[in-house]
Image: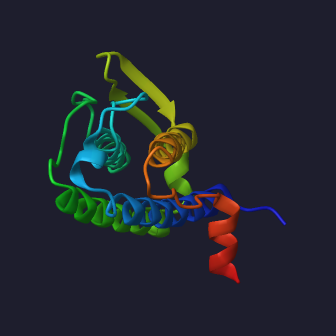
Amino acid sequence: MGMELIDHFRMLARYNRIANERLCECCAQLDDAEYRRQRAGSLGSIHGLLNHILLGDRIWMSRFKGSGHSTPPLVTVLFDNFAELRSAREKQDAEIESFFGESEAGFLERELCYVNSQKRDCRDAMPMAVSHFFNHQTHHRGQIHVMLSQTSVPPPSLDLHRIINTLAG
């Protein structure tokens, strides 16, 4: 029983929302100093990574919708306040889930043209771009997971099959 690619991306959108909810719930338990503490890894802190994931999602979603042809600096801090960042994250995840829920398979036949962060013109097949979009989120959530393990707050389970099977059962 095969899964159509668009259905696979719908599943990843749902997973993305739940994984972000779980991660933000844990991050909300940290005091501000621990949340912002500089740590080894991309972007140096949980706060930096959460902002970067949201920025990346906004960049890719604008591209998927037909705009977003250029890329802002990838270290841009969208929100300095965790509560505002979390709220924006929830809205973005709802938008992602809705977008992929309403997308038809024909969406994946398009080609995506944009200028990347190194100012290079890029052209990607849509399935590759969408795969990167979800992989980017997972990659950086994994880094936050490691950073959380260095605090008194245990990181959440983010296993795809556990989350999705819990929803199905």
Residue 67 visible to the viewer:
no
Residue 70 lies, in percent from the top left, at 25, 29
Q: In this view, does 3 lie to the left or right of 46?
A: right
The C terminus sits in image quarter: bottom right
What's the coloring here?
Answer: rainbow
**Furthest residue to the right?**
1
Give above or below for 40 relative to 55: above
How many numbered circles are shown? 0
Q: In this view, does 3 lie to the left or right of 68?
A: right
Residue at screen point 57% across, 57% down: 9
Residue at screen point 52% across, 38% down: 132
Residue 162 lies, in percent from the top left, at 68, 66
**Furthest residue to the bottom?**
169
Give above or below for 18 relative to 115: below
Q: In which quarter of the image is residue 163?
A: bottom right
**Furthest residue to the front?**
152
Residue 22 lies, in percent from the top left, at 46, 65
As rendered, which of 90 and 38 lies closer to the eye?
38
Q: Is residue 154 left or right of residue 77?
A: right
The N terminus sits in image quarter: bottom right
As rendered, which of 79 and 98 lies closer to the eye?
79
Residue at screen point 31% across, 32% down: 38
Q: Is residue 32 left or right of residue 125?
A: left
Give above or below for 67 relative to 113: below
As rendered, which of 158 and 61 lies closer to the eye?
158
Residue 11 lies, in percent from the top left, at 59, 64
Residue at screen point 36% across, 68% down: 94
Residue 65 visible to the viewer:
yes
As rendered, which of 71 and 79 lies closer to the eye?
79
